[in-house]
Image (cartoon, grey):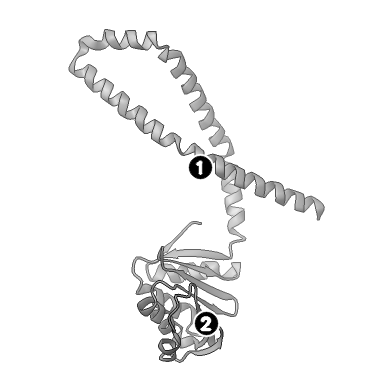
Amino acid sequence: MGRLRDALRRFQTSVYYLDTQLREFFEMKSHLEALESAYRDLQDALAETPDLERVVEAFIRENDILPVYKELRARYESVLALLRKYEPLVDEIDAKLERYRSYRYYLFKDDELVPRFVDLLLSDRDSVIIRPLIFGGHSIDDALKTVGAEPVGKLSYRVPGDRAADAADVFLRQFGDYGFVIEADDVKLTWKPDVNVLRVDVPRDKIHEVDEIAQRIGATILAA
C-alpha cells in the first residue's frame, strides 16, 4: 500500500507539473505566428524588389541570425522527437484514466435541450432531489410547487421523477442565474448557467450510457 500511495503522489505531481509546463509551452504559438508573418512579408518584399537580396544577406550576417536559427531548428526538432517518443505513453495513460471516469461535462447549444436530457435520464426514478446551485435571495417554493415539489430541507425539494424535467425547466426559465443540482440515488446533475454546461456524476460503468443519451439529443460531450 505504501508503494501505491507513493506512486500515486508522484503521478499526481508529474501530471500537475507537466500540465503547467505545457500551458507555458503554448505561448510559443504566438512567437511562431510572428515568425511566419515576418518571414512571409520578407519574401513578398524580395519578390517585389529582388535587388534587396544583398541588404537581407548583410543584415543576416551582421546580426548572426543564421547560427541562432540553426540552434533554434535543432531545439525544435528535439522537442518534436521528445513528443513523438512519449506520445504512446500519453495515449496509454489517457485510455487508462478514462476507465476511472465517473463524471462528464455536456454542452448544450440550446437551454431547452436540458429538460429533455433530464427527462431521458431521470423520468423513471421514483423521486429526485433538486436545489439551486446558487441562492439568489428569491423564494422558489411557489414556482416548484407547480411541478409537484415538496420541501425536504433548506432550499432542497423532492420532485417525482417524471416531473424532474419540469423542475429543471422552472430553474431555466424563472431562475436562470441560479443553476441547479438534481440528485437521485447514484446520479447527480449540476447545471452551470454561466457556461451552459451540465455536469453529470454517475458510476463509471454508466458513463457511456449517459454519453449516448446526450448524443441522441445533440449535446456536445466535452473531453475534460
Q: Is residue 17 left or right of residue 195?
A: right
Q: Which mark is residue 128?
A: none
Residue type (three-letter) at the residue carrying disc 2:
Leu
Q: In the depicted view, which residue is nearer to us: 141 or 1?
A: 141
User: Which residue is drawn at the image coordinates 58% and 35% (left, top)?
Assistant: 85
Q: Which mark is residue 23?
A: 1
Q: Are marks 2 and 1 in contact (CB under 8 Å)?
A: no
Q: Where is mark 2, residue-wise?
A: 155
Q: Is residue 207 visible?
A: yes
User: Which residue is drawn at the image coordinates 50% and 42% (left, top)?
Assistant: 23
- Callout 1 crowding tier (Cα within 10 Å): few <14, some 14–19, many ≥20: few
- Placement of the N terminus among the 4 image quadrants: bottom right
Residue type (three-letter) at the residue carrying disc 1:
Arg
Q: Is residue 28 left or right of residue 87?
A: left
Vertically, is 14 above or below 83?
A: below
Which quadrant of the structure image shows residue 43? Answer: top left
User: Which residue is drawn at the image coordinates 48% and 56% (left, top)?
Assistant: 223
